[in-house]
Image (tube, rainbow, N blue to C red):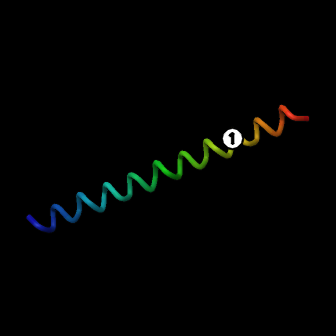
C-alpha cells in the first residue's frame, strides 16, 4: 500500500516536471517569435 502511494507521488512529480519543461519550450518559442517581430 505504502509503496503504491510512493510510486503515484513520484509519477505525479515526474509529470509536473515534464509539464514545466514543455512550458519552458513554449516560452522559448514565444521569445523567438517576439525577437523575429522586432527586426
**Location of residue 23 with respect to 34 vertically, above or below:** below
Q: Which residue is mark 1?
A: 29
**Location of residue 20 with respect to 36 vertically, above or below:** below
Residue located farthest toward the left when viewing the structure as drawn: 1
Tell whether 7 sits left or right of 37: left
**Location of residue 19 with respect to 6 vertically, above or below:** above
User: Could you tell me which quadrant the N terminus lies in?
Assistant: bottom left
Q: Quadrant of residue 5?
A: bottom left
Within 10 Å of the Cα at label 1, are there few (<14), some (14-19), or many (20+) other Cα atoms? few
Q: How many marks?
A: 1
SS at mark 1 in the image: helix
Residue located farthest toward the top when viewing the structure as drawn: 37
Residue drawn at the location 91% of the way across and 35% of the way down = 39
Tell whether 2 sits left or right of 19: left
Tell whether 3 sits left or right of 38: left
Q: Quadrant of residue 3?
A: bottom left
Residue located farthest toward the bottom when viewing the structure as drawn: 3
Q: Residue 15 appears at what percent x and percent y?
A: 38, 52
Q: Residue 33 appears at what percent x and percent y?
A: 76, 35
Q: Residue 9 appears at what percent x and percent y?
A: 26, 60
Q: Residue 13 appears at what percent x and percent y?
A: 35, 58
Residue drawn at the location 59% of the way across and 49% of the way down = 24
Tell whether 30 sits left or right of 34: left
Q: Quadrant of residue 31?
A: top right
Amino acid at each position: 500500500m505504502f509503496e503504491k502511494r510512493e510510486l503515484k507521488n513520484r509519477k505525479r512529480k515526474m509529470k509536473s516536471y515534464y509539464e514545466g519543461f514543455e512550458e519552458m519550450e513554449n516560452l522559448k518559442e514565444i521569445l523567438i517569435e517576439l525577437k523575429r517581430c522586432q527586426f
